[in-house]
Image (cartoon, grey):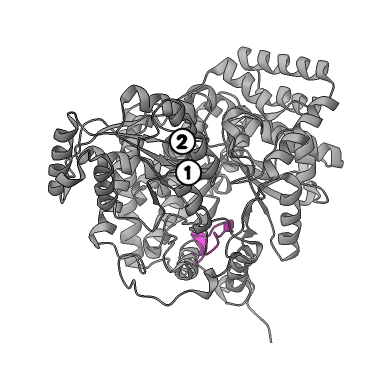
């Protein structure tokens, strides 16, 4: 009996990396042995932002949300016994993408690989870093230049490599509507291609358009998400043909990978996340004409902390069951000609075109960063308000909250904890690397890198030479910061209250009363210490506090505890709120409280929000933290009331 011809399945990835290069290498080889077909490397925050593991800003962040890669030796260890010539490797790296690709190339050369055969992707999308993820380093213009330097270099030397992965994933995590996700991602792609046209010969340009890939998010409204992906396919084809004159349909193909939504994973009843992940995966696999090329799924317990290898295996098995047990891959597109799908796709395309026209009128994505950021903050505020009001149902959170205790989350090993000794181990090996290298060769390579950055020469050859010479991530980062300067992206939080003040009358009256008793307007300082760039929560807390009538200070991401303490002193803050989602809350909070005590501000209440395991709650309370909030605390007005009560100078008056 003959069987229908099946399509090849997408690449099965697991986004992974932690503690050290050695520990991550062991995890990669284990996952590949379980049937994973591509690597997806997560780098820690110092690596993403161009700092060495022993830098002041790296304290507490080393190996927390990914693997630390400080030099060629680390990259060599990361891919030990993994033949790079045969591997398809996705690296989620943006500001330091030229450097990490340089290290990858140098490591592959050491393995004896044919560099022209290397396959994979560097994300290399800096615009979404300004809008949502926060791991940017330099201003937009030189950052765009480095993106297109990478693209031009890969065209000449790594023809099978995807030099840029336009990432709309974090836009949805920041609250983007489907129309905004479509428009902001496509505007980013056109900004890059407009610049790349100046660096690539016209006969090579269509093929370079064909190397641009996308990385998207799929949320729980899976019919809408399916239609969004079909809209992406049609809009991209239209842009490539009309804007860039690409005639070959294969170069106009919308090629994308996906990680399904982490924003919607709940701390409450976390076992429900298994079903959410499955439904979200269907949105990017059911429609053949809009099917993902690669899929990576979060683990069910990522709202609680780091997933264990078993949790990642469970998500991998979900992909394998869909691809190999069901008959999905045996059929043509299931939705072509469906009038309901067509109407929804057309509506999404119309909304996206309206946003694109607005961005084009402003001069393109680079000049529209502040506009796009403010739109995301507004959209996220509306999303949160809808959940608070119960208009958007989240099972186990605002509906059907009664539940049996979960056996999956019982016991001390329900989540993985990053090795607490990893940071010291990493720094010791970094010291040994510096001691063993040829310092003169490093100085020469860094001088050549500086010259290339200054005179406009493609940054890749000098970066690869620096990697071979033994330069470190921090040294590469210092050169580009020195030449191009650093940048602070807009927060999207305006100083004036919005008109979204429904249900805030009681809170506004309470803020007024407490402010009267304080003798001045209640001052709330929101800070993000360390390198964590996930600012969505901080922005929403700042926005709601502002709308409640508080005097807020929020200066954005990447501040040292000392800088936050200085601000608390100069602003005479009544309450300090910290947002930390990188897992580095214990050392950073401890350092801030010591800084406050040194300034005589130990009496100022400190509250902390983040993904904080139960095992760390008592540690923070012992340090003196007044209130702790985790993802389960989604009712912002209750948090606002807590802040006001902490500032209350006369508890009797408040009763």
Residue for point 12% across, 47% down: 505
Percent across and percent down for residue 353 are 33, 43
Q: Considering the image in quadrants, where does the N terminus appear?
A: bottom right
Please give the name of the residue rendered at 35% of the width and 61% of the height, measured from the top-left corner: 342
In contact (CB < 8 Å): disc 1 and disc 2: yes
Membership of 391 in magenta stretch: no
Task: Describe the element under mark 1 as helix, strand or loop.
Answer: helix
**Sequence-earlier tag: 1 or 2:** 2
Which residue is identified by label 1?
Answer: 623
Q: Residue furthest front?
A: 652
Closest to the observer: 154 or 36? 36
Residue 397, image x and y in percent?
Answer: 35, 65
Residue assigned mark 2: 593
Residue count near mark 2 (Cα–Cα under 10 Å), binned few <14, some 14–19, many ≥20: many
Q: Residue 46 is drawn in which quadrant?
A: top right
Percent from the top left, x then y, of residue 398? 30, 65
Q: Judge from the rendering whether residue 395 lies leftward or rightward of residue 190; answer left or right.
A: left
SS state under label 2? helix
* Residue 273 seen anywhere in this rendered image of the structure: yes
Nearer the observer, 364 or 592: 592
Q: Which residue range is magenta in the image?
A: 285-301
- The reply to whether residue 182 is in sight is no
As drawn, is 522 to the left or to the right of 333?
Answer: left
Q: Is residue 291 magenta?
A: yes
């Amino acid at each position: 009996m003959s069987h229908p011809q099946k399509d090849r399945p997408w690449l099965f990835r697991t986004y992974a990396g932690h503690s050290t290069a050695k520990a991550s290498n062991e995890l990669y080889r284990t996952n590949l042995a379980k049937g994973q077909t591509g690597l997806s490397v997560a780098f820690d925050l110092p690596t993403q932002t161009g700092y060495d593991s022993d830098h002041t800003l790296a304290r507490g962040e080393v190996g927390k949300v990914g693997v630390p890669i400080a030099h060629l030796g680390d990259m060599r260890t990361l891919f030990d016994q993994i033949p790079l010539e045969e591997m398809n490797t996705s690296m989620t790296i943006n500001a330091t993408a030229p450097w990490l690709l340089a290290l990858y190339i140098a490591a592959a050369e050491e393995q004896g690989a044919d560099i022209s055969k290397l396959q994979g992707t560097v994300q290399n999308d800096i615009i979404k870093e300004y809008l949502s993820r926060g791991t940017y380093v330099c201003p937009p213009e030189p950052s765009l230049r480095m993106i297109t330097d990478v693209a031009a270099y890969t065209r000449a030397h790594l023809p099978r490599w995807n030099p840029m992965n336009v990432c709309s994933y974090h836009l949805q995590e920041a609250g983007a509507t489907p129309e905004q996700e479509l428009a902001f991602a496509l505007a980013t792609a056109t900004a890059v291609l407009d610049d790349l046209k100046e660096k690539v010969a016209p006969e090579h340009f269509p093929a370079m358009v064909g190397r641009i890939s996308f990385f998207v998010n799929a949320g729980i409204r899976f019919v809408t998400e399916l239609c969004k992906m079909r809209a992406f396919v049609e809009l991209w084809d239209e842009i490539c043909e009309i804007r860039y004159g690409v005639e070959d349909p294969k170069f106009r193909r919308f090629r994308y990978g996906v990680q399904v939504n982490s924003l919607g994973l709940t701390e409450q009843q976390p076992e429900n996340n298994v079903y959410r992940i499955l439904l979200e995966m269907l949105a990017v696999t059911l429609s053949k004409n809009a099917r993902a090329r690669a899929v990576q799924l979060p683990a069910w317990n990522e709202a609680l902390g780091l997933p264990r290898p078993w949790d990642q295996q469970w998500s991998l098995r979900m992909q394998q069951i869909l691809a190999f047990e069901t008959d999905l891959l045996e059929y043509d597109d299931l939705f072509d000609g469906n009038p309901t799908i067509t109407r929804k796709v057309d509506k999404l395309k119309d909304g996206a075109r309206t946003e694109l026209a607005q961005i084009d009128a402003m001069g393109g994505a680079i000049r529209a960063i502040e506009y796009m950021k403010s739109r995301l903050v507004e959209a996220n505020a509306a999303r949160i308000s809808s959940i608070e009001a119960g208009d958007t149902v989240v099972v186990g959170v605002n509906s059907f909250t009664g539940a049996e205790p979960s056996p999956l989350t019982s016991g001390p090993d329900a989540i993985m904890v990053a090795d607490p000794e990893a940071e010291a181990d990493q720094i010791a090996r970094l010291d040994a690397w510096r001691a063993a290298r040829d310092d003169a060769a490093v100085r020469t390579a860094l001088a050549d890198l500086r010259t290339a950055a200054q005179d406009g020469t493609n940054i890749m050859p000098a970066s690869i030479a620096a990697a071979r010479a033994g330069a470190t991530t921090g040294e590469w980062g210092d050169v580009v910061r020195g030449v191009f300067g650093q940048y602070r992206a807009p927060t999207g939080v305006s100083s004036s209250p919005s008109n979204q003040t429904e249900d805030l009358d009681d809170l506004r009256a309470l803020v007024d009363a407490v402010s009267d008793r304080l003798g001045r307007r209640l001052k709330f300082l929101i800070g993000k210490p360390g390198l964590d760039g996930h600012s969505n929560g901080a922005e929403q807390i700042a926005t709601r506090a502002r709308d409640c009538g508080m005097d807020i200070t929020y200066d954005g991401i990447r501040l040292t505890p000392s800088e936050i303490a200085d601000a608390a002193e100069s602003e005479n803050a009544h309450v300090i709120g910290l947002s930390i989602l990188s897992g580095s809350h214990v050392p950073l909070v401890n350092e801030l409280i010591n800084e406050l005590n040194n300034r005589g501000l130990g009496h100022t209440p400190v509250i902390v929000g983040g993904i904080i395991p139960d095992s760390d709650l008592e540690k923070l309370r012992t340090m003196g933290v007044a209130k702790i909030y985790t993802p389960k605390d989604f009712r912002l007005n209750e948090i606002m009331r807590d802040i006001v009560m902490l500032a209350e100078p006369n508890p009797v008056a408040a009763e």
